[in-house]
Amino acid sequence: MPLAIEDWLTVIIMALLALITFANVLVRYFTNASFAWTEEVSVFLMIVLSMVAGSAAVARNRHIRIEYFADSGPEARQRALAKFGAAMVALLFGLIAVLSARVLWDDVQYGE
């Protein structure tokens, strides 16, 4: 139950993506024009979806790894590899947060 928020966010974001895309297809079909904002909103929602789904995968211990190496060998090696994997995931999320903040700052600074 603790991951219910991530699961519901995933469902809501996927539904929003489907609705936005469907609305854009309908508008293009009937008017030969399209909503200009749908691409930017879709990209933003896909990024949020990746972050939410990635955090849920890490919380469930279902993130990508090579099972042959992660689950074989001595217990000490398995723990060391699990700690290394967790550190790499934390580093990745930290790097994404820092780079996203820099992009946001550039957008604010240049008035985009």
Image: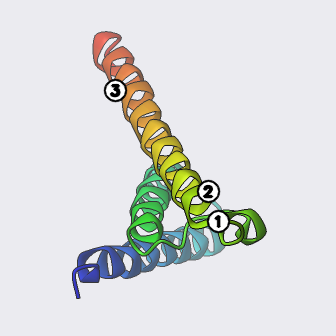
Q: Quadrant of residue 72?
A: bottom right
Of the image marks 3 and 1, the number of the one nearer the N terminus = 1
Spatial distance from mark 1 to mark 2, Cα to Cα? 5 Å
Determine the residue positioned at 51% across, 59% down. Answer: 79
Check disc 3 and report its element: helix, strand or loop.
Answer: helix
Q: Is residue 15 visible?
A: yes
Residue 62 spot, x, y in % from top left: 53, 73
Residue that badge 3 annotates: 101
**Left or right: 24 with respect to 52?**
right
Instruction: Farthest residue to the bottom: give it.
Output: 1
Residue under label 2:
77
Q: Secondary structure at mark 2?
A: helix
Please give the name of the residue rendered at 47% of the width and 71% of the height, measured from the top-left corner: 61
- In terms of image quadrants, where is residue 2? bottom left
Tell me if residue 92 comes above or below residue 69 in the rendering.
Answer: above
Q: Is residue 43 left or right of residue 30?
A: left
